[in-house]
Image (spheres, rainbow, N blue to C red):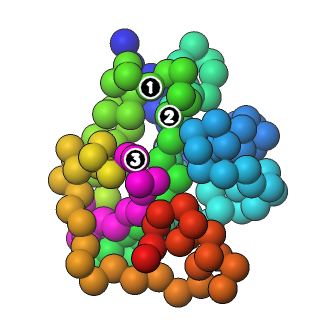
């Protein structure tokens, strides 16, 4: 069974409280729904996956539409994982973004193997710049050394 995937053209029908809850349930931290909506609206691409009219998956990406894209906030509801919904979402994300050059992503540490199935490889030169507080959180969560 597949989820029904909608792109950014369906953004007006999204319940941002539900998206925020989905992100938190999927291990992507609790966030302010107003900022979640802002991030998705400011993204070049968005995807929303529904199963029986319930949001169970989402992803977004920013892109220069020329050389590079950044895929972010890819999540499937934990109780819906293992049904192929993540695969369906990732195939769509990769198919959409690859024509625009390289696609970058950073993942929760335990999900890197999942993304490798879709052609993602580890960078040896990836770096991040952020506030001291953000860097400390990233280090504590195992994202940076």
Q: Classify the position of the N terminus by image quarter.
A: top left
Locate residue 62, reporting x and y percent.
47, 67
Locate residue 38, reporting x and y percent.
72, 62
Locate residue 34, reporting x and y percent.
81, 57
Q: Which residue is mark 3?
A: 110
In whole angstroms, how far apart are the C-alphas of marks 2 and 3?
14 Å
Q: How busy is the neighbourhood of tag 1: few (under 14 within 10 Å), some, or many (20 plus)?
A: some
The residue depicted at 46 percent of the width and 66 percent of the height is 143
The residue depicted at 41 percent of the width and 54 percent of the height is 109
Up/down of 73 relative to 103, above or below = above
Mark 2 or mark 3: whose residue is earlier in sequence: 2
Let me know if residue 110 is in the magenta part.
Answer: yes
Up/down of 116 relative to 122, above or below = above
Marks 3, 1: nearer the viewer? 3
- In the image, 1 versus 4, the foreground residue is 1
| Local SS, label 1 | loop
Q: Quadrant of residue 41?
A: bottom right
Q: Please give left or right for residue 104 compared with residue 30 in the image.
A: left
Q: Please give left or right for residue 39 compared with residue 82 in the image.
A: right
Magenta stretch, residue numbers? 98-111
Mark 1 or mark 2: whose residue is earlier in sequence: 2
Q: Which residue is mark 1?
A: 81
């Amino acid at each position: 069974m597949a989820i029904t995937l909608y792109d950014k053209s369906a953004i007006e029908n999204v319940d941002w409280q539900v998206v925020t809850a989905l992100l938190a349930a999927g291990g992507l931290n609790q966030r302010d729904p107003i900022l979640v909506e802002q991030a998705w609206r400011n993204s070049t691409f968005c995807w929303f996956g529904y199963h029986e009219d319930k949001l169970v998956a989402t992803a977004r990406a920013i892109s220069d539409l020329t050389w590079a894209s950044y895929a972010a906030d890819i999540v499937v509801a934990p109780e819906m994982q293992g049904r192929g919904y993540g695969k369906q979402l990732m195939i769509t994300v990769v198919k959409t973004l690859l024509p625009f050059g390289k696609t970058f992503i950073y993942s929760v540490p335990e999900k890197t193997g999942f993304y490798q199935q879709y052609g993602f490889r580890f960078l040896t030169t990836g770096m991040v710049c952020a506030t001291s507080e953000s860097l400390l959180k990233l280090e504590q969560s195992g994202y940076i050394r």
